[in-house]
Amino acid sequence: MSYEYEIPLPGMYIQDELDARGLSQRDLAFILGIEEPALNKIIKGKTGISFEMSKALAKAFNIDADFFANLQKAYDFARAEEPDPGVERRAALQNVYPVREMIKRGWIGSDNLEIQMARFLKIANANEITHVAHVAKKTNSGEEATPSQVVWLCRVIQLAGSMPAKRYSEHTLRDGLHRLRAFTIEPEEVRHVPNFLEGCGVRFIIVEGLSGGKIDGVCCWLDSSSPAIGMTLRFDRIDNFWFVLRHEIEHVLRGHGREQEIIDINLDRITDSSKEEKQANDAAAEFCVPQNKMESFMVRKSPFVSERDILAFAKTIGVHPGLVVGQFQRKTERWDFLKHHQVKIRHLITRVAITDGWGDIAPVTL
């Protein structure tokens, strides 16, 4: 906001009051209990009228206490420098997108934000950035993806597009699932996942989630024959890793997400799902623990399932105990049950997979 006219010095009103009353500056200085030079500086605008002085002047002239304070405020406001135009632009972007977090993570720079955001989001017109925040993306809950979720997805696609990959083979991926499942026996075996997927023509990327995103993973396609799987490792647990990975693999095998990416959020809790999500959830659960064997185990052992029972069952079916614990928790909603078996694997998988986050920036430019 700026004034189209010159705001007079607040001191001019003091002089007007003096003239109207036939008083001199010396007289007013005496009344106020200050030195005359100090009053002269106020009248000439060299010193502003403080709140204390405004109250004193109000007593001296018998007028409203805020009269001179408001005059000084209007004068100071009119003379204030206009803010950096970037303030308004940054506010418009930050109110929609997690721009500050994107800059911190090295996804974009701090200069020419509109242009960089347009390139990042692949929007032709930089002026349309704040109007296409959702870009019609969907989550597995059927709701529109938030701008934060869309930004994360764009980063996954960006990284996937920079990766070389073999031609995708559904046959190789499907036939290799038994080999993939053999990796679930020990946490360290997750190191084989990137090479396995690369051999099937599936790009695999790990991107740390953005604040409030609640994303577990996504299956997306760079084109009709180039699938990519992105994961956040939001829950650093062995059971969650394998469940989410197998969930996304099922999406790939069924060709889900070719026309419209579906961002998977809260996979550990969402039960009211679409047909596509149910298919992926069922495949993931079956992969982690064969469901007929899981049901049989629970019938035989419930309601008193011990740690020893879990360990023996996991050994029988050839998976890490954490996977059994995860399935047991999902079925009983006893989320604290033997959770010490749900070991961390992030430090293992990020050593071998293309990773962006936790202090590391994947080498890709806009």
Image (spheres, grey):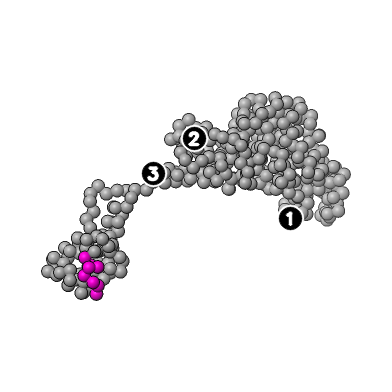
**Residue beneath label 2, please?**
118
Place residue 273 in its image quadrant.
Answer: top right
> Which secondary structure, mark 1?
loop
Left/right placement of residue 337 relative to residue 69 reads right
Main SS, magenta region, reads helix
**Residue beneath label 1, please?**
336
Q: Nearer the viewer, mark 1 or mark 2?
A: 2
**Residue beneath label 3, please?**
85
Residue 100 sits inside the magenta stretch: no
The amino acid type of the residue labelled 1 equals Asp
Q: Residues within 10 Å of mark 2 (few under 14, many from 20)?
A: some
Residue under the image location 73 percent in, 46 percent down: 345
The amino acid type of the residue labelled 2 equals Ala
> Which secondary structure, mark 3?
helix
Earlier along the polypeptide chain: callout 1 or callout 2? 2
- The answer to whether any part of residue 348 appears in the image is yes
